[in-house]
Amino acid sequence: MIAKVVFNLGVEKEFDYFSPEVNLVGKRVLVELNKKKLVGVVIKEAKKTNVKNIKEIRVVLDEAGPTLSREQLRFVYMLKRYYPYGLGELTFIMIPSLLRSSKRLNIESKIVKKRSVSRRKKECIFFKEPNPYCRLEIYRKKIASALKNGSVIFCVPTSSHLKIVYKDLEKKFSSKIALLYSQQKRKEFFSEWLKIKEGKKLILGTRIAIFYFPEDLELVILDEEISPFYFHPEKPFYRVSEVAYLLCQMKKIDLILGGDFPSLEIFKMVKEGKIKLVDKKKKNTFSSWKILEAKDIISKRHSLKVNPLIIEILRKTGEEGKNVAIFYPRRGFSLYLRCANCGYLYFCPKRCAPLRYSQEKNELVCPFCGYREKAPSSCRRCSSSYLKPEGVGMERISFYFKRFFPQFKTSLERKDFLLVTYSNLDTSFWWENSFFCSLVLNPHLLLSLLDFEATFRLYIYLNRIRYLTREEVIVFRQFSHHYLWESLDKNWLDFYKKELHLRKKAKLPPFIYLAKLTLRAKDKDILLRKAEKICKILKKNDKLEVFGPLKEYPFNKLNKFYYSIVIKSARRKVIFEEIKKIFSLFRRGTTKLAVIIR
DNA sequence: ATTAAGGCATTGCCATGAGC
DNA sequence: GCTCATGGCAATGCCTTAAT
């Protein structure tokens, strides 16, 4: 028998090997390739081969059942049509890392697919519900009914979500749960994977869990679908909501997406009728907006100038014993640290950017690479002891407020006020307490980012702040002519429609596929030459819009230089085929490539 | 993510030849 | 006879490709 074997290499091809055994499909084998021993997976069996000098399979590593089911292999072929990766790479995503080595295995899957007699039509739903606990309640019911017929995959964006969800579901389904997440130790992951083979029905995990589906899968749930954690940013790139959608199409089963808001991609699918939107338009019990056209906090020489209204709000709520949340986009005490005597600016040694100064931790931090050092007491160059913090970070504001209101307790002991950055809003809210009032400071810093998704993201952030706030959200805005502000008081659908309309007009995702190729190398000139070469190759394709090469910001980071090229096309296939081509140019060499696809 | 071989291009050395 | 320029070949190095 001839076995067609794929490897975890960037090679598209499958390789033929001879084996006296049969029924090897889905099994891992140890074979020789180019004088090296490698672990591969048999994806097909054939009777004939065109290859001369065929080699024999050394060892069949899966002695009893195969590692991958036939259905999983079928899914690999399906994914191959959507993503620019080889069969081998895609196959190996579905294999626990412990089994990617030549570990022998002797287990048989106990899951046998039952043919359900009368299957109702498959459903794909988005549940719009801001309260995560209400969503969980919905999921719990759905899980319970689906478990009667088969297995369920429940994906959450991060491992901290996982803990909360596990705690909740444990009570009801503890004997049936298998946990899969990428931070697990290899052995732990493997033993949880074994549980699936042994018939644990509820697979709970982060984005990778979607690939470890059993044959009797009945339902896939993706909570907080909008979360950025559902993108796998490295090669192989994938987007979990897309993979889940494909999987449910293939297996003809239900897909439940949930969250406070859908992503625009999902919303577009709702408009196209592919996904059903469930929005229990409950009575609007949310807090109200108060949008002020005013400056909030300005740094003035040695002191801060704070809008008196902020002080007034803090005083009033403080007297009434109510809490306030303040959202501010800058971490640390100051943005820079500069010697007032000689002008020396403390910079990241890896040439990324000026270092941010944190008084609380008494250290300097690079905002890009995470480098940190102890804060100096005197200037490195002139040894003057007058080092001046420049710019306003949230520590500095906190410091100011505490001086103003010495009776305030620090945020950890009792939350009189809590000062956080917007990025705390990236994951949805599992926060236990809510705030009486929220202050949104400097939101325009987020709007002015060179990012087509900035507005959308701020809209989501502001609404999440609203969910957390009981009384009033006070926004200090400085760009008054922005469609975001008008949208806040309207129905969310209006904003989504407006955003979709604008994206369509500007030829942006989700109407067009867009990929950003980031090249990095230690040598500036080699990098630019390579980037220009890539651009030249890309520009040959007239179905593609090519922008670049552009200097990244920061241009120099981690001692390396960065250039990016952006390509756009209305057709997914065009983009992916080009990326495939470019990937093959980067297999070796000092220049590295990262790709983000939207 | 590896390895070896082959291709292409650049560099370097030497020989030849022209000019002074 | 000496110097400088040119051409050819060998050596080197970087990059690409194939692998059953």
Image: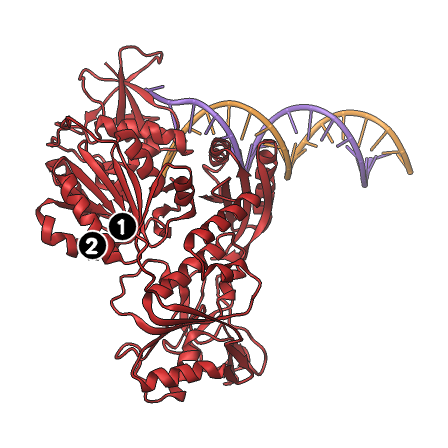
Chain colours: A red, B orange, C purple
Compare marks 2 and 1 and give the one earlier in the sequence: 1
A145 relative to A237 in the view: left or right: left
Numbered mark located on residue A156 in the image: 1
Chain letter belonging to callout 1: A
Q: What is the CA distance from the residue labelled 2 to the residue labelled 1?
A: 8 Å
Q: Which residue is mark 2?
A: A165
Residue at point 19% right, 26% down? A59
A409 relative to A523 in the view: left or right: left
- Label 1 residue SS: loop
Q: Are marks 2 and 1 in contact (CB under 8 Å)?
A: yes
A529 relative to A163 in the view: left or right: right
A151 relative to A493 in the view: left or right: left
The kind of residue tagged 2 is Val
Tell me where residue A479 appears, x and y as whole percent: 56, 66
Viewer-side residue, A459 vs A405: A459
Residue at point 17% right, 17% down? A21
Q: Residues within 10 Å of mark 1 (few under 14, many from 20)?
A: many
